[in-house]
Image (spheres, rainbow, N blue to C red):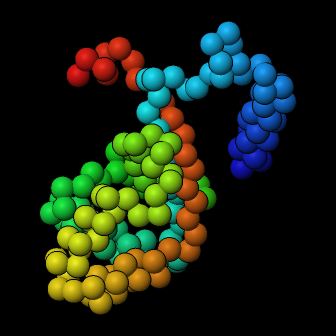
Amino acid sequence: MHIFKWGRVLVLSTALAMFAVPASAQDDEEGPQTQGDDARYITATYVKFKPGKRERAFEIIAEHFKPAGEKAGTPGPLGAIHFQSGEWDALFVWKMEGGMADLEWYRSEDDIKWFAALVEQEGGEEAAGAIIAEYQSCVDEAETDVGHYHETMDEEDD
């Protein structure tokens, strides 16, 4: 366990050192550098469930949230990982279709469509709110991070 903590400290130290250079080092002759046109942004949400609530949370996702997304035609997560060890119970990775601009929305168009489908599926706003509240009552802690990856030429051709 101590190895993992030291590994995190090393990674964090290295990351902080990278940002210690002046901001002008991020500029070139044509202006500030960005992540590039091939950058694809994601959110990664780590979730820790309350003791004994993990299975119920996954049932709610499978029986209520996922069918509402299918009905609404909204994208689900790129992936979901169920951990057997470590601090978190699950990780859900979502593509940010609009890139970093997606962070400007309190509720996106897809969020609104998904909630409307959930309301219809559950028989009203009160019932939809109740199933969301039940899921939230299963969650002990959650953390969301934003990151990006770069498409390769092969992915762009698909």
Left-right relation of 55 to 124:
right
Q: Is residue 46 left or right of residue 123?
A: right
Please say whether residue 62 is visible from this viewpoint. no
Residue, far top: 29
The quarter of the image holding the C terminus is top left
x, y (%) of residue 65?
28, 68
- The image shows residue 21 at horizontal and vertical percentages of 83, 25
Residue at point 34%, 87% (across, down): 130
Q: Which residue is drawn at the image coordinates 32% and 58% (left, top)?
A: 109
Residue 45 or residue 129, whichever sits in front? 129
Q: Nearer the viewer, residue 136 or 150?
A: 150
When asked about the image quadrant of residue 142, the answer is: bottom right
Q: Nearer the viewer, residue 66 or 2?
A: 66
Image coordinates of residue 143 in percent, x first then y, are 58, 60
Q: Quadrant of residue 16?
A: top right
Identify which residue, 42 or 3, lies in the foreground.
42
In the rendered image, residue 59, in percent from the top left (x then y), is placed at 29, 72
Residue 131 higher or lower than 55, as above or below:
below
Q: Looking at the image, is 120 positioned above or below residue 22?
A: below
Q: Residue at x 34, y 84 (%)?
A: 129
Name the residue at 19% across, 62% down.
72
Residue 31 visible: yes
**Number of numbered tags placed on the structure image:** 0
Name the residue at the bottom extreme: 126
In this image, 77 relative to 16: left or right?
Answer: left
